[in-house]
């Protein structure tokens, strides 16, 4: 396989990053900074907002499961651009929908297309880089998502005084549609040749769950549940905990996005130089502390710590887990990515649902963050059973 030029690597990373901006920042997580405004406009109640989030995560799980069937290169080249363009169209449609049931259907469809793209685009870029010996750069594809979070903060707050209701989605759509078109054109240039035949007669195992990978899957499930409450409700929580007029109310999502942006190159570097397994421990510790912060400090300090630590840790969990999983099972490729994201999505969809049940039972939103803390303790426990580099080398399984 010929080495890729710096320009080719940049365009591959940009293509994947742009896709994540469209589906995961503008299409999905824009809902988080928009939700307090939608509540204030009377478009949704808090319980309805949690319900819409739950259905979006159900769609995300369905999309990730569907990606398991579409991960083959021939199918991927058709499914990825269709899902990406469809997601941008759904974001546009949300700008014209004031009906709660209609919004529920659109958030479900958004989740399905988001799940497909979030699996297939980074997996395609990772495989393209890995075949050229540059897999350690793969985490940088998530820079687009992190930068997209900064954009969603600005696009939600800058026009807050002159847009109302569903129209608040229009700025997101205005960027999502052209960016989706550009990303599709670039992603279609990435070709993954079939794997060379093995020299021995023993075919590689097709099992996704084995003694090495199962603990990693279980830890990742906890991460999916742990991060989703802060990443869905943090601006709403700031509105509840902070006094009216506190500048942090409008800035908390901006701080979350900024922490996420800084964390991508940081975790990518730490994983490449210190080991993905050790760095992954760090992401779970920081996110656990972040979930505990509003419980222990129900004020501006607790909210800011939650934004910084969860925002700065969760994308590290994603990129490090993807790389570590590939080192455990290098022959699985996009199928492995799809399984991981499906598990992550399945775990996280329970978060808003449990929050809704807790609210209906008379609990508070801040109390529900204890669920996130427990989830990260679960993840740390399972990580001890994930084999380290020395074990993998002894088994001949470490392929970087």
Image: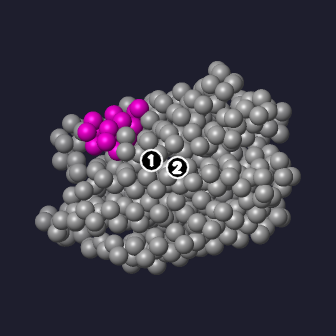
The span shown in magenta is 267-282
- Describe the element under mark 2 as helix, strand or loop: helix
Given residues 332 and 296, the one toward you in this image is: 296
Q: Residue furthest right?
A: 42
Residue, x 13% and y 65% (percent of image)?
199
Check disc 2 and report the residue beneath it: 344
Point out residue 213 in the picture as x, y percentages from the top left corner. Answer: 37, 46
Badge 1 is on which residue? Answer: 318
Q: In this view, does 122 lie above or below 297?
A: below
Q: In which quadrant of the rendered image does the N terminus lie?
A: bottom left
Q: Could you say which quadrant of the image residue 17 lies in?
A: bottom left
Q: How far apart are marks 1 and 2 (CA)?
A: 9 Å
Where residue 370 is drawn, which disc sits there?
Answer: none
Q: Could you say which quadrant of the image residue 278 lies in?
A: top left
Q: Answer yes or no: is residue 372 visible.
A: yes
Q: What secondary structure predominates along the stretch shown in magenta? A: helix
Q: Is mark 1 on a helix, strand or loop?
A: helix
Q: Does the magenta stretch include residue 299?
A: no
244 with respect to 155 (left or right): right
């Amino acid at each position: 396989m010929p080495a890729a030029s710096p320009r080719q690597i940049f365009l591959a990373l940009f293509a994947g990053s742009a896709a994540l901006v469209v589906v995961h920042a503008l299409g999905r997580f824009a809902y988080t900074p928009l939700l307090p405004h939608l509540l204030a406009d009377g478009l949704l109640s808090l319980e309805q907002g949690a319900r819409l989030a739950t259905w979006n995560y159900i769609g995300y799980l369905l999309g990730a499961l569907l990606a398991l069937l579409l991960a083959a290169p021939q199918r991927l080249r058709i499914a990825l651009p269709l899902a990406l363009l469809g997601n941008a169209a759904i974001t546009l449609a949300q700008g014209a929908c004031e009906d709660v049931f209609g919004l529920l259907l659109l958030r479900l469809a958004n989740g399905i297309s988001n799940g497909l793209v979030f699996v297939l685009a980074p997996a395609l870029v990772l495989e393209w880089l890995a075949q050229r010996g540059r897999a350690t750069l793969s985490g940088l594809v998530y820079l687009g998502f992190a930068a997209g979070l900064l954009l969603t903060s600005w696009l939600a707050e800058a026009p807050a005084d002159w847009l109302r209701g569903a129209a608040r989605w229009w700025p997101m759509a205005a960027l999502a549609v052209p960016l989706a078109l550009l990303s599709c054109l670039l992603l279609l240039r990435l070709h993954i040749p079939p794997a060379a035949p093995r020299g021995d007669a023993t075919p590689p195992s097709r099992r996704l769950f084995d003694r090495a990978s199962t603990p990693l899957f279980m830890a990742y499930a906890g991460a999916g549940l742990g991060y989703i409450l802060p990443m869905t409700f943090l601006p709403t929580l700031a509105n509840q905990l902070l006094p009216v007029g506190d500048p942090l109310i409008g800035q908390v999502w901006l701080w979350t996005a900024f922490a996420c942006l800084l964390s991508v190159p940081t975790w990518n570097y730490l994983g490449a130089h210190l080991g993905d397994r050790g760095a992954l421990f760090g992401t779970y510790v920081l996110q656990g502390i972040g979930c505990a912060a509003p419980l222990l400090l129900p004020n501006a300090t607790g909210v800011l710590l939650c934004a910084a630590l969860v925002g700065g840790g969760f994308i590290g969990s994603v990129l490090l887990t993807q790389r570590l999983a590939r080192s455990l099972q290098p022959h699985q490729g996009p199928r492995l990515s799809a399984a991981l994201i499906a598990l992550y999505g399945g775990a996280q969809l329970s978060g808003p649902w449990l929050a809704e049940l807790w609210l209906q039972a008379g609990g508070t939103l801040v109390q529900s963050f204890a669920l996130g803390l427990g989830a990260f303790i679960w993840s740390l426990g399972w990580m001890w059973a994930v084999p380290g580099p020395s074990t993998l080398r002894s088994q001949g399984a470490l392929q970087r």
